[in-house]
Image (cartoon, helix red, strand yellow):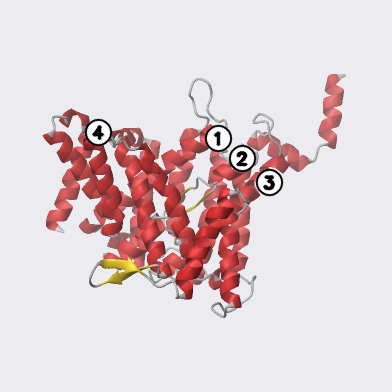
């Protein structure tokens, strides 16, 4: 009798829903198609600001804005599909905030490399990340870096990103006397950027759905009303991806000076990914009682492979987004959430006119807000041990002051090794740290 009822139910059940349930194991994860679709939409809306922010940053490196916009959408979509279909995790991916700024303002702007060579470095770091994800080396390398420096790297990237946002908005400007000084809030760009930042903070505090995206669009509308933004429409056929597709110069990235750049891309991406995926696993109940994390290895492989895929279309390192927690809060538990998010990123390629209208001061407000969130890692630093605290602070401070994530990491690592060595704690420094420090010292001496 029960078998007959089950058979009747199967006949009435939509075939598509049945296939999705089996493929993504929805019932096993106590979810359904409707919940996963809503979760995917939620994750996309909280991440969608990247399709406006990243092209603006990439354009500063000389990349065609339209191509950068399409590359952002396509790179994010493909990464989400890979995470959802291969790892079955409810995680959205897109070009990483902070890493895109490092790409533009340090590698291209400060070091003087062409953006094609910078993309080559992104590709190489992604390949290394993939190799490490398939071998035990990844775990060995992750464990060799002290926790204080791991947290410091994330916070330092945040501070670096915040300085870029303040500089872009004109809230902080250069000064011959003091190096930096406060800009003028009589300038519309500074005022509107500050307004965008405050609006995001208020909406996020009240947990307003899509607060970052709403704030960017609201400030853009205010700029349009003030005559600062020219209306070009909302929807159109996507711009050409040709200017960035397979444009990376891998041979040019095989330069001694690029070693620290490749390592910076690798380390920041690796630790950011590990932290994000662990946080997501906890929230999505993917951790069993014995501590085993379901499909964690596949999730790491999907994330690392996404950076390679992103480089092929013209993106800075693509990484997992902590904003995925919003979709998980909406009930997302499987890869169907990520696939839905990917479909929405793919559909977003038709919003190029809207992306082209978003002014730099609107995205600057978002940069400043994201920077504040990233600075939260400072609370996890061991402030009682000076041999841990001082290298961490050096890392955080030197990233924005040298305008380089790579220099901040190098100086923090060297400071850590020297302090531990001279205070009788040499045994607390892993062999890998000594090797990395030797590479960084050689960079400063010979390059």
Whichever of callouts 2 and 4 sits on the residue coming sooner in the sequence is 2
Q: What element carries label 4?
A: loop
Instruction: Please tell me whether residue 272 is drawn above or below residue 1 in the rendered image.
Output: below
Q: Is residue 225 visible?
A: yes
Residue occupied by mark 2: 329
Between label 4 and label 3, give the one nearer the viewer: 4
Which quadrant of the figure contains the N terminus? top right
Residue at 36 percent across and 47 percent down: it is: 155
Callout 2: few (<14), some (14-19), or many (20+) C-alpha neighbours within 10 Å?
some
**Gap in Å between the C-alphas at discs 4 and 3?**
46 Å
For the residue pair 366 and 297, the one nearer the viewer reads as: 366
Q: How far apart are marks 2 and 4 (CA)?
A: 37 Å
Sequence-wise, the earlier of marks 2 and 1 is 1
Q: How far apart are marks 2 and 1 (CA)?
A: 8 Å
Q: Mark 1 points at which residue?
A: 283
Indicate which disc residue 271 carries: none
Q: What element carries label 2?
A: helix
Asked whether the residues under the numbered discs 2 and 1 touch, taking CB atoms below 8 Å apart as contact, a structural biologist would say yes
Which numbered tag is attached to residue 385? 4
Q: State the residue at coordinates (50%, 45%).
A: 322
């Amino acid at each position: 009798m029960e078998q007959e009822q089950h058979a009747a139910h199967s006949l009435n059940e939509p075939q598509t829903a049945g296939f999705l349930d089996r493929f993504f194991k929805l019932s096993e994860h106590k979810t359904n198609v409707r919940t996963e679709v809503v979760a995917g939409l939620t994750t996309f809306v909280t991440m969608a600001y990247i399709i406006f922010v990243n092209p603006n940053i990439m354009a500063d490196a000389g990349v065609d804005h339209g191509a950068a916009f399409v590359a952002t959408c396509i790179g994010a979509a493909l990464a989400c599909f890979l995470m959802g279909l291969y790892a079955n995790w409810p995680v959205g991916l897109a070009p990483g905030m902070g890493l895109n700024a490092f790409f533009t303002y340090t590698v291209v702007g400060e070091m003087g490399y062409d953006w094609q060579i910078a993309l080559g470095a992104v590709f190489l770091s992604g390949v290394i990340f993939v190799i490490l994800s398939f071998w035990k080396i990844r775990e060995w390398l992750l464990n060799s870096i002290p926790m204080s420096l791991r947290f410091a790297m994330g916070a330092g990237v945040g501070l670096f990103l915040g300085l870029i946002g303040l500089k872009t908005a004109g809230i902080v400007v250069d000064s011959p006397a003091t190096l930096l000084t406060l800009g003028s809030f009589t300038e519309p760009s500074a005022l509107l950027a500050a307004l965008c930042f405050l609006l995001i903070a208020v909406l996020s505090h009240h947990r307003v759905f899509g607060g970052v995206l709403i704030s960017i669009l609201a400030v853009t509308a205010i700029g349009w009303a003030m005559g600062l933004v020219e209306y070009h429409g909302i929807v159109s056929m996507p711009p050409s991806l040709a200017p960035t597709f397979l444009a990376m110069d891998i041979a040019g990235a095989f330069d001694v000076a690029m070693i620290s750049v490749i390592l910076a891309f690798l380390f920041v991406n690796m630790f950011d990914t590990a932290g994000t995926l662990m946080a997501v696993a906890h929230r999505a109940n993917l951790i069993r009682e014995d501590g085993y994390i379901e499909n964690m290895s596949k999730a790491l492989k999907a994330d690392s492979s996404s950076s390679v895929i992103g480089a092929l279309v013209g993106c800075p390192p693509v990484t997992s987004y902590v904003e995925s927690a919003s979709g998980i809060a909406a009930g997302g538990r499987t890869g169907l959430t990520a696939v839905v998010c990917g479909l929405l990123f793919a559909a977003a390629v038709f919003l190029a006119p809207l992306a082209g209208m978003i002014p730099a001061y609107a995205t600057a407000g978002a940069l400043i807000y994201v920077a504040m969130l990233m600075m939260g890692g400072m609370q996890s630093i061991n402030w009682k041990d000076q041999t841990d605290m001082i290298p961490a602070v050096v890392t955080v401070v030197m990233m924005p002051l040298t305008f380089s994530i790579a220099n901040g990491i190098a100086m923090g690592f060297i400071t850590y090794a020297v302090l531990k060595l001279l205070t009788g704690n040499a045994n607390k420094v892993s062999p890998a740290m000594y090797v990395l420090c030797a590479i960084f010292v050689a960079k400063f001496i010979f390059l």
